Image: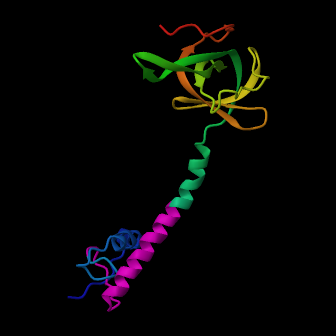
Amino acid sequence: MSHTLRMGASVQLAPIVLFTTSLFYNGKQRCGWSHHLGVKRAWFGQPGLCSILNFVRLFSAILALTFLAQPALQASEKQYLTATIVDVQQKTTTRILYYVVDTPITKDDPYFEVSVQLKNIVYVGRYVPRHADDTLPDEWVAGATVQARVDGRHLFVKRPGGNDVDFAIEKHTAVKPGEKISGPAPPVK
């Protein structure tokens, strides 16, 4: 049975359909052009060559999509915004290390609780330093302006040197646009 190339819309769609159908070669059809459009097949004669060509086509399609998606992924990166520190507190939490004759042996671990106003929301974040003597920058006092961004349940605040401090967000509260907050953030209702 002889098939000839049909003129019209199928001629314009043929390269796209041929490329996509050849990407998903199932091993039963011959390598090359689609038989369903009435287009003549190109037969390379070697089944091994068909699988190699399909792999190359699939790899090149994935590579092209990766390069096309790159700018969109970079544009979705969260940008730092100007924020104001509302309150900084150093607190401790007590944890039990072990028991000696029903008496708990405890240790106080320090952590910092920082309230930051970003746009119209006050975020309260918790930072646990790696070492007990680590501190936050001295410039971080109530009313100080910093660069911050929110990513899920984390608040990232830039240090003066450029590094980030990762705060786990404990709560957040909406603030009216003209209202200024002083002291700790109001409780969430």
Is residue 118 positioned above or below 53 on the image?
Answer: above
> Looking at the image, can residue 159 be seen?
yes
Q: Position of residue 63 (x, y in %)?
A: 51, 66
Q: Position of residue 141 (x, y in %)?
A: 75, 17
Residue occupying the point 70% across, 18% down: 85
Q: How many marks?
A: 0
Q: Position of residue 69 (x, y in %)?
A: 54, 54
- Extreme residue in the bottom direction: 45
- Residue 116 magenta: no
- Residue 55 magenta: yes
Residue occupying the point 58% across, 42% down: 76
Residue occupying the point 48% across, 70% down: 60
| Figure quadrant of residue 79 | top right
| Figure quadrant of residue 167 | top right
| Figure quadrant of residue 174 | top right
Is residue 155 positioned above or below 90 on the image?
Answer: below
**Colouring of the image:** rainbow
Residue bounds of the magenta highlight:
36-65
